Image (cartoon, rainbow, N blue to C red):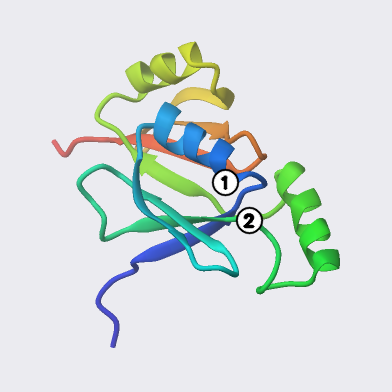
Amino acid sequence: MFNAITHSQMYVLDQDEALDFYVGKLGLEVAADVDLGFMRWLAVSVPGHPERQILLEKPGAPAMSEETAAQVRDLVTKGAMGGWVILTTDDCRKTYETLRAQGVEFIEKPTERPYGTDCGLRDPFGNRLRFTQPKTAG
């Protein structure tokens, strides 16, 4: 029935700050930045892969009331929204050192796992991300 997942979504509290973090620090690229009038559709993707985008959505209308948006903002700040964004890299330790030097907050250093080397970080709002250097076959 389906042949692709094209978009995932995460809440951010400030879309300009999100742009600085996801594009300026993590090196993703802007896939879409459109003012729809009722909201800003801001999506990023891994360079060269626009077929898989992350929508960086600000909690609020029209999707929810201001009361609900306040609750969502509180959950985002606590890192309690659930879910992960997991990226891959060719060199987990080098990427970790590069991002650390840029002031990125890590919650877990690179660690060897059965599937490869990975580590965990948070964006400026509290969202959890991981990146992995997959183990090579052989």
Residue at point 55% right, 68% down? 37
Residue depicted at x 25% and y 42%: 47
Q: Quadrant of residue 83?
A: bottom right
**Residue 90 percent location from the top left of the image:** 24, 29
Kind of element beneath mark 1: helix
Callout 1: few (<14), some (14-19), or many (20+) C-alpha neighbours within 10 Å?
some
Residue ranking furthest to the bottom: 1
- Residue depicted at x 71% and y 49%: 76
Label of residue 15 in the image:
1
- Image quadrant in which the C terminus is located: top left
Residue placed at 81% from the left, 65% from the top? 66
Tally of numbered tags? 2
When the figure is inspected, residue 5 is found, relative to residue 116, above or below; the finding is: below
Q: Residue furthest top?
A: 101
For label 2, the residue is 58
Residue, far left: 138
**Could you classify mark 2 by the number of other residues whose Cα lies within 10 Å: few (under 14), some (14-19), or many (20 or more)?**
many
The answer to which quarter of the image holds residue 99 is top left
Q: As drawn, is 2 to the left or to the right of 11? A: left
Query: Dots 2 and 1: beta carbons under 8 Å?
Result: yes
> Residue 34: horizontal and vertical position, in percent?
43, 60
In the rendered structure, the answer to whether residue 32 lies left or right of residue 123 reads left
Q: CA distance from mark 2 to mark 1?
A: 7 Å
Query: 72 and 32: which one is in front?
Result: 32
Image spot of residue 53 (x, y percent): 37, 57
* Amino acid bearing label 1: Gln
Decide which of 27, 5 is in the foreground and name it. Answer: 27
Q: Where in the figure is residue 78, as x and y percent of width and height?
A: 77, 43
